Amino acid sequence: MKKGRIDEAREVLRQIGEENYEQELTDIVESIDAEHVTSDSLFSSKYRVPIFLAISIGMFNQLSGINCDSSTT
């Protein structure tokens, strides 16, 4: 189904004995569509500020030379 081979999926469902294979096919298509809608990309605008802050803080820490190791006295 994910590769667009709907006719083959329909035939497989019919061959395995699915009584209502058209409804099952529709359910599979809906679940695949729902899966694509809910997936968020790491680089979407939703995560832009937290990623920027994390990288900036890490760069500042490296470039400033501050050692946060408290075990040395």
Image (cartoon, grey):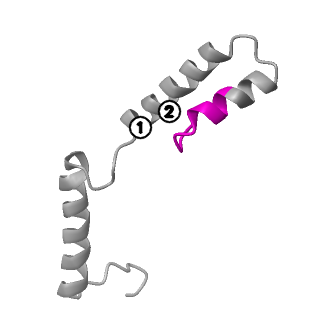
The residue nearer to you, when weighing 5 against 51, is 5
Q: Amino acid at mark 1?
A: His
Q: Marks 1 and 2, how far apart in space?
A: 6 Å
At numbered mark 1, what does the secondary structure look like: helix, strand or loop? helix
Which residues, given as a range, are shown in magenta? 1-10
Compared across the picture, whether 72 is left or right of 19 comes to left
Position of 57 relative to 4 (above/below): below
**Which of the 4 quarters of the picture holds residue 69?**
bottom left
Q: Position of residue 25 (x, y in %)?
A: 60, 22
Residues at discs 1 and 2 in contact (Cβ within 8 Å)? yes
Q: Residues within 10 Å of mark 2 (few under 14, many from 20)?
A: few
At numbered mark 2, what does the secondary structure look like: helix, strand or loop? helix
Q: Residue at x 57, y 39 (%)?
A: 5
Q: Is residue 8 magenta?
A: yes
**Looking at the rendering, in which quadrant would you find the C terminus?**
bottom left
Position of 54 relative to 36 (above/below): below
Q: Which mark is residue 50?
A: none
Q: Position of residue 60 (x, y in %)?
A: 18, 77
Q: Position of residue 13 (x, y in %)?
A: 72, 25
The residue nearer to you, when weighing 62 against 52, is 52
Q: Which mark is residue 32?
A: 2
**Which of the 4 quarters of the picture holds residue 15?**
top right
Position of 2 relative to 69 (above/below): above
Compared across the picture, whether 19 is left or right of 56 comes to right
Q: Residues within 10 Å of mark 1 (few under 14, many from 20)?
A: few
Q: Is residue 57 magenta?
A: no
Q: Residue at x 27, y 56 (%)?
A: 43
**Looking at the rendering, in which quadrant would you find the N terminus?**
top right
Q: Residue at x 62, y 16 (%)?
A: 22
Q: Amino acid at mark 2?
A: Ile
User: Which residue carries the number 1 mark?
Assistant: 36
